[in-house]
């Protein structure tokens, strides 16, 4: 996103000769605080960002660290805060899927707030009507749309049976959310001002891009939680591991700059984090695979009204033998390794792919965020975590990782969820359920999975 500059405004000056045409002389640019906020017909000039719209984070250095160089002060503060965040993450895993979902929703709201706050800070001098109110209204409408389906799939029967007054809001969530958005759209049009058109439409797009980024990705992450905690852990913690190891390798060994958008990123940190993250992902999958609480999808028990993590492990979490390709055998033989096959769990191969993406591709989401911050001359999105910045500063790489995880699961892993299918069947009228039962019985008998009913004499 390039930096926006003012357009110079020319003024005409008559010469002493009446026959001479008027000449244009560029007017000297005024300071940012003296620039006009609007023009009569040509709209308003966009702001010239001469100073950060959001002040940089101020980290209070404890007294026992003040004798250290600033570089090591930052290292200790970041390390301590990372440890606290890691312990909090482990606590959420212990509390289960529901707690994780609520935290993801909280993170989504805070990320949206940070993005919207930047837009509001940049254009705060324009006195824009209803910008922040409509932004939060659109967030509410978008969340109602994307999570309405999840509520219907996972809790449809319970809501229909126990909370009947809420059922219409779940059954017709698409229609209701459409009209919620339409009302917001109408309100935006009614608040348009002639002298603010350009900025208002700019921030309307700003809000919708923020919605696309945070709402869609948070919904994807929530779905991955219910598919099995092991998938959620591998994808999210691989990004965390890569970020930590890139910082560690870059801090101690970094010499060569990786990309201009992030001058502190180095090739040494990137390569060191790559190998560390791939090894971490494969080993994590190996040690989590034997535990049902990580491998089983979360299934809702209507009697206990809780999510249960209990199932028979699928073949994805059992050792299988794979033949090594001939060209790889030739390469390994050069090192004295004469392997023809290898026994690994399929989950380890999937973890290898996910962690490789987290190491090579996901960092570009962070570079994108760095470019965004440079465009608006801000150091961090916020000041939630000392030494780390805001929520977006910690979860920028998770956005691209979440998208890849969803696509990868949908392509290579996920199969139709019987629980979700049953929820949809139970919501049908009785005659439709009977039709499905008869057709399913015929199919099972034809496939030899069910004995035909005995004919009474």
Image: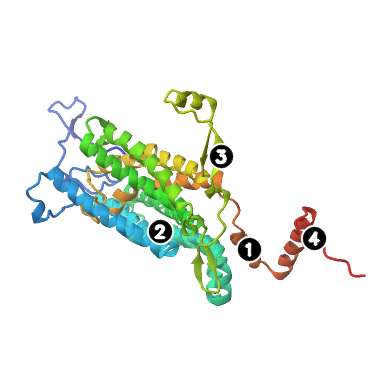
Disc 2 residue crowd, few under 14, some 14–19, many 20+, Cα 10 Å: many
Instruction: Mark 2 vs mark 4: give the one in front.
Output: 4
Residue under label 2: 139
Q: Is residue 251 above or below residue 440?
A: above
Q: Are marks 2 and 4 in contact (CB under 8 Å)?
A: no
C-alpha distance separating marks 2 and 1 = 31 Å
- Give the SS element for disc 1: helix
Please report whichever mark, 1 or 3, sits nearer to the chain's N-terminal start.
Answer: 3
Please report whichever mark, 3 or 4, sits nearer to the chain's N-terminal start.
Answer: 3
Please report whichever mark, 1 or 4, sits nearer to the chain's N-terminal start.
Answer: 1
Colour scheme in the image? rainbow
Q: Number of callouts in the render? A: 4
Tell me residue 342's x, y (percent). 52, 36
Residue under label 3: 321
- Give the SS element for disc 4: loop
Q: Quadrant of the C terminus?
A: bottom right
- Give the SS element for disc 3: strand
Residue toward you, 313 or 74: 313
C-alpha distance separating marks 1 and 4 = 23 Å
Please report whichever mark, 2 or 4, sits nearer to the chain's N-terminal start.
Answer: 2
* Picture quadrant of residue 454: bottom right
* Picture quadrant of residue 188: bottom left
Residue under label 1: 422
Q: Is residue 37 something that shows in the picture?
A: yes
* Picture quadrant of residue 133: bottom left
Q: Quadrant of the N terminus?
A: top left
Instruction: Mark 3 vs mark 4: give the one in front.
Output: 3
Instruction: Mark 2 vs mark 1: give the one in front.
Output: 1
C-alpha distance separating marks 3 and 4 = 36 Å
Q: Are marks 1 and 4 in contact (CB under 8 Å)?
A: no
Disc 1 residue crowd, few under 14, some 14–19, many 20+, Cα 10 Å: few
């Amino acid at each position: 996103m390039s930096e926006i500059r003012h357009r110079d405004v020319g003024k005409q000056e008559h010469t002493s000769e009446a026959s001479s045409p008027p000449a244009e002389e560029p007017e000297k640019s005024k300071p940012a605080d003296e620039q006009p906020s609007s023009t009569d017909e040509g709209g308003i000039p966009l702001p010239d960002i001469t100073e950060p719209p959001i002040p940089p984070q101020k980290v209070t250095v404890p007294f026992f660290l003040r004798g250290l160089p600033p570089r090591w002060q930052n290292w200790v503060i970041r390390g301590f805060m990372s440890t606290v965040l890691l312990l909090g993450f482990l606590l959420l895993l212990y509390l289960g899927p529901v707690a994780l979902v609520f935290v993801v929703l909280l993170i989504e709201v805070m990320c949206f707030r940070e993005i919207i706050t930047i837009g509001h800070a940049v254009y705060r001098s324009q006195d824009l009507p209803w910008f922040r109110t409509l932004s939060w209204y659109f967030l509410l409408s978008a969340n109602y749309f994307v999570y309405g389906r999840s509520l219907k799939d996972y809790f449809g029967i319970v809501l229909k049976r126990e909370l009947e007054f809420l059922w219409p809001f779940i059954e017709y969530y698409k229609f209701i959310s459409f009209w919620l958005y339409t009302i917001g759209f109408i309100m935006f049009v009614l608040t348009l001002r002639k002298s603010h058109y350009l900025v208002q439409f700019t921030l309307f797009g700003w809000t919708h891009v923020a919605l696309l980024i945070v709402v869609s990705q948070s919904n994807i992450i929530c779905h991955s939680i219910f598919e099995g905690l092991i998938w959620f852990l591998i994808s999210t913690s691989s990004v965390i591991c890569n970020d930590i190891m890139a910082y560690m390798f870059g801090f101690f060994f970094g010499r060569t700059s990786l990309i201009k958008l992030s001058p502190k990123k180095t090739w040494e940190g990137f390569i060191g984090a790559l190998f560390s993250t791939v090894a971490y992902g494969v080993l994590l999958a190996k040690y989590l695979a034997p535990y049902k609480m990580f491998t089983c999808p979360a299934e809702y028990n209507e009697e206990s009204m809780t999510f249960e993590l209990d199932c028979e492990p699928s073949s994805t979490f059992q050792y299988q033998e794979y033949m090594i390709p001939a060209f790889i055998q030739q390469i390994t033989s050069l090192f004295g390794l004469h392997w023809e096959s290898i026994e690994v769990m399929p989950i380890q191969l999937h973890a290898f792919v996910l962690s490789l993406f987290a190491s090579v591709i996901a960092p570009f989401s962070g570079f994108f965020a760095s470019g965004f911050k440079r465009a608006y001359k801000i150091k961090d999105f916020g000041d939630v975590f000392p030494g780390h910045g805001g929520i977006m500063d910690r979860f920028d790489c998770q956005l691209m990782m979440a998208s890849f995880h969803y696509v990868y699961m949908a392509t290579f892993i996920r199969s139709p969820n019987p629980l979700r299918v049953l929820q949809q069947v139970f919501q049908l009228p009785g005659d439709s359920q009977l039709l499905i039962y008869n057709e399913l019985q015929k199919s099972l008998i034809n496939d030899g999975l069910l004995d035909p009913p005995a004919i009474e004499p």
